[in-house]
Image: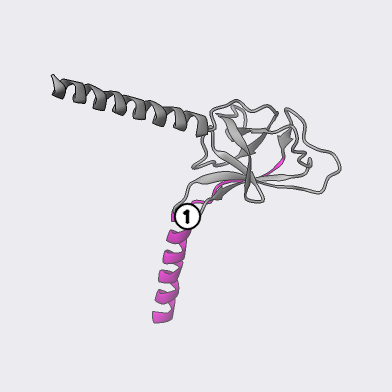
Amino acid sequence: MQSQFVEALIGTFVLALAGYILWFGYTKADTQVANGYKVSGFFTKVDGINKGSDVKMSGIKVGTVSGLEIDPKSFMAKVMIQLPTNLKVPLDSSLAVVSDGLLGGKYLAITPGGDEENLKDGDVIEHTQSSINLESLIGQMVFSQDKKEKKNDA
């Protein structure tokens, strides 16, 4: 009888601990819908960017990617981002897909422009830079070194 009581007590403790971990994870995650305005940008490639990816300005998270879709006319990737209403971003700002270190993930970086007018809900950021494929850059460097060595041998 005593062992059943101890087992029930341990089981209750484990369930309470699991509930606390779930509650903590939910409250610390960015699952809340942010108030603000949405803007978008068009890219040729958005490798590594997904719904919920960070949008940063000067290294500080200021928004999130709220959606991704293909434009049926240009076949470019349309990325929609959500920014807070208190962040006034100049109209001529640029948006780039940036790597978070050599092995890190990717995020969108806003580089503010100098325009007096600010982006409004539904505006499109005209200046964008797509993601850079690191593997192809390394391949180009390796193969260009091979070609230089072959020319020097000849």
> Is residue 154 in view from this perspective?
no
- Residue 136, position as x, y percentages in the image: 46, 55
Identify the residue at the far bottom of this view: 153
In the picture, the quarter occupied by the C terminus is bottom left
**Quarter assignment of residue 45:** top right
Name the foreground residue: 69 vs 27: 27
Identify the residue at the far front of this view: 2
Image check: 103 left or right of 89? Answer: left
Image check: 151 left or right of 129? Answer: left
Helix, strand or loop at disc 1? helix
The residue tagged 1 is 134
Residue 154 vs 26, above or below: the answer is below
Query: Which three-letter amino acid code belongs to the residue tagged 1?
Result: Leu
Identify the residue at the far top of this view: 1
Q: Is residue 101 magenta?
A: no
Residue range (magenta): 126-154
Residue at 49% over, 51% down: 133
* Prevailing secondary structure class for the magenta stretch in the rendered image: helix
Residue at 46% over, 65% down: 141
